[in-house]
Image: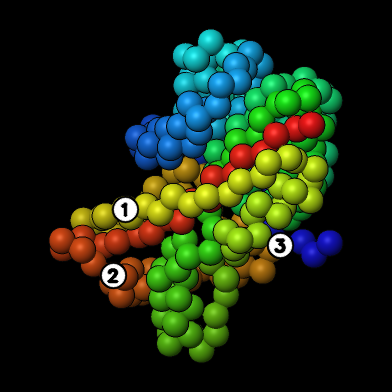
C-alpha cells in the first residue's frame, strides 16, 4: 500500500494540539454536535462507547448521555485529556482494540490522516458488539478546495515548483461503499456543508494548527516556504460580507455491525 501520510508527523501535530485545543473547542463542539445528532435518529440505547480522536469534546458529550467512554488517540497526550478512560493507540496498522467490546464507536474528523481507511473501518467493526453502531465524520472532496488551488498557483508563481500542503480527501460517493466493504450493514453517507468566515484570514491557518491538522503528507516539502506564500494565497480566497470564506464538506458515515 502506498504511504501517503507521515504517521510520526501526525502524532507530533496532535501532541502539540493537546496544549492548544481551547482555541478551537467551540468549532469542534459544533461539528461534534452535528455528528451526534444522528444518535437521536435511532431507538437503540448505548452503554459502552469508543471515542476515537475526539480531542476532549466528544467524551463529555457521550458521558452526558449516560454512556461509559474509552478515549482512544494516537497521541497519548490527547488520549489523557479527552475525557474518557485513556486508550493510547500503538499505531495506524493495528489499533489493538478488544473485539466486540463497544456498542458505539464515534470517530469525529479523525480518520482522514490514515493510509488504510478501509482497514480502520474493519477494525472498528470487529471492536463493535453485534448490532453496534459506527458513527464517523471526515472531510471529503471540496473541503478547502480554493485554498488548495491558491497555494499551488501561488507557490508555482513564487518558486516555479509546487508541493502538496492539503491532504487528499475521498469523494462522498465512495464513503458508503467503504462501509459496505468493511462489512457494515445499512451503510449511509450524507453530507454537511459548512462555511466559516474569517475577518483575519491567517486565523484559519492558526485554527488548523491548534486542532492538530498540520501537513503530515509524506510528499510535503521540508523547506521553509516563501514568506509571501500564505498571505498571497489567502488574499485570493473568496469573500462574503467582507470576510474570507473557508468551506468544509463533512461526510457523516453510519453503519451497523451484524
Disc 3 vs disc 1: which is toward the camera? 1
Residue furthest to the left: 241
| Left or right, residue 130 beside residue 68 | right
Residue drawn at x 61%, y 61% is 173
First in sequence: mark 1 or mark 2? 1
- Residue 236 in the image: x percent, y percent? 30, 75
Name the residue that disc number 3 marks: 4
First in sequence: mark 3 or mark 1? 3
Name the residue that disc number 1 marks: 196
| Mark 1–mark 2 CB contact (< 8 Å) | no
User: Quadrant of the image for the N terminus?
Assistant: bottom right
Query: Could you tell me how far apart the alpha carbons at marks 1 and 2 are, in whole angstroms?
Result: 11 Å
Residue furthest to the top: 66
Name the residue that disc number 2 marks: 238
10 Å neighbourhood of mark 3: few (<14), some, or many (≥20)? some
- Residue 26 in the image: x percent, y percent? 35, 35
Amino acid at each position: 500500500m502506498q504511504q501517503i501520510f507521515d504517521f510520526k508527523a501526525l502524532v507530533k501535530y496532535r501532541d502539540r494540539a493537546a496544549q492548544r485545543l481551547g482555541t478551537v473547542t467551540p468549532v469542534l463542539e459544533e461539528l461534534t454536535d452535528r455528528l451526534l445528532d444522528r444518535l437521536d435518529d435511532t431507538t437503540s440505547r448505548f452503554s459502552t462507547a469508543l471515542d476515537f480522536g475526539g480531542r476532549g469534546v466528544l467524551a463529555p458529550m457521550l458521558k452526558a448521555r449516560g454512556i461509559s467512554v474509552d478515549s482512544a488517540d494516537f497521541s497519548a497526550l490527547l488520549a489523557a485529556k479527552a475525557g474518557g478512560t485513556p486508550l493510547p493507540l500503538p499505531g495506524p496498522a493495528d489499533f489493538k482494540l478488544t473485539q466486540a467490546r463497544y456498542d458505539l464507536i464515534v470517530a469525529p474528523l479523525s480518520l482522514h490522516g490514515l493510509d488504510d481507511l478501509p482497514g480502520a473501518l474493519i477494525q472498528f467493526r470487529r471492536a463493535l458488539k453485534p448490532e453496534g453502531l459506527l458513527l464517523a465524520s471526515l472531510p471529503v472532496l471540496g473541503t478547502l478546495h480554493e485554498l488548495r488551488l491558491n497555494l499551488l498557483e501561488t507557490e508555482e508563481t513564487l518558486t516555479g515548483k509546487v508541493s502538496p500542503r492539503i491532504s487528499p480527501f475521498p469523494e462522498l460517493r465512495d464513503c458508503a461503499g467503504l462501509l459496505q466493504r468493511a462489512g457494515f450493514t445499512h451503510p449511509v453517507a450524507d453530507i454537511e456543508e459548512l462555511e466559516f468566515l474569517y475577518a483575519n484570514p491567517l486565523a484559519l491557518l492558526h485554527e488548523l494548527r491548534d486542532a492538530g491538522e498540520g501537513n503530515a503528507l509524506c510528499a510535503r516539502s521540508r523547506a521553509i516556504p516563501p514568506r509571501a506564500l500564505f498571505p498571497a494565497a489567502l488574499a485570493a480566497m473568496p469573500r462574503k460580507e467582507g470576510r474570507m470564506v473557508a468551506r468544509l464538506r463533512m461526510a457523516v458515515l453510519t453503519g451497523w455491525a451484524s
